[in-house]
Image: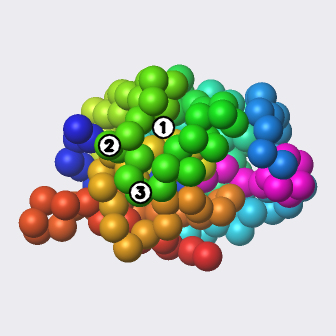
Amino acid sequence: MITQKEFYFIRHGQTDGNAAAVKQDHGDISLNSMGREQARMIEPIVASLPVKTICYSPLKRAKETREIACSSLIATHAEVTNLSECNTQIWQEMTTLGKQAKSTLNEPVYSFMQRVLKGINEALACHGPVLIVAHGGVHWAACCLMEIDHHDWMIDNYIVTHFSIKEDGRWTARKLNE
C-alpha cells in the first residue's frame, strides 16, 4: 500500500524515442530539445508548489527534467533507484491489461509494480510535500496501485500531477497542466 501522503509527480520531458512514438527500450537517454523546452515551460508551475523534497529517477531524462523544471525550488534532492522506468515488454503488458491489471499481473509486471511501490514509499518517507520526477510506467503503476479513477493512467511528457487523498480515504489525481 502506498503511504497516504499527498505528493506531486512529473513525467520527464520528451526524448527522441518519445517523439518517434517508438515502443522500444530506450536505455539511459537524454531529453531532446523539445523535452528541454517542456521542462522550461513547467518551471513556473513547479516553482509555485509547496515542495520540500524532490525525489527522482536516476535516468538522465528524469534528472535533466528535474534540473530544469525545479531550478527555482529550494528543496532537498534525493535520487531513488526504484523510480526507474520499466522495460518495453512490461510497459506493453501493463497497458494491455488496462485498469484491471492489478488482478491479473504476471511476474515481471508484478515485480515492477512492487519496485514502484517501494520507490514511492521511499520518496514519501522524505519531508513533504514531495515531488517525484520519473517516467510514464512509474505513473501508470502508481495509478494502478492507488486505484485511481477519473484520471488518465498514461500521461504525456512533462505533465505535472497532484496526487491527494479524499475524505473517504481514496486517492485522487489532478493534472496541473496539459
Identified by mark 1, the residue type is Cys
Identified by mark 2, the residue type is Ser
| Mark 3 → mark 1, Cα distance in angstroms | 26 Å
Residue drawn 59% across the image and 35% down it: 90
Identified by mark 3, the residue type is Lys
Secondary structure found at label 1: strand
Q: Earlier in the sequence, mark 1 or mark 2?
A: 1
Circle 1 is placed at which residue position? 55
Residue drawn 41% across the image and 47% down it: 101
Magenta region, residue range: 11-21
Circle 3 is placed at which residue position? 99
x, y (%) of residue 72? 59, 55
User: Magenta span has 20?
Assistant: yes
x, y (%) of residue 48? 48, 67
Which class describes the residues within 10 Å of circle 3: few (<14), some (14-19), or many (20+)?
some
Outermost residue, left side: 168
Image side of residue 45 versus residue 150, left or right: right
Image side of residue 26 versus residue 70, left or right: right
In this view of the protein, which residue sits in the foreground, 58 or 78? 58
| Mark 2 → mark 3, Cα distance in angstroms | 9 Å
Which class describes the residues within 10 Å of circle 1: few (<14), some (14-19), or many (20+)?
many
Image side of residue 37 versus residue 52, left or right: right
In this view of the protein, which residue sits in the foreground, 45 or 117? 117
Circle 2 is placed at which residue position? 103
| Mark 1 → mark 2, Cα distance in angstroms | 29 Å
For residue 15, above or below residue 47: above
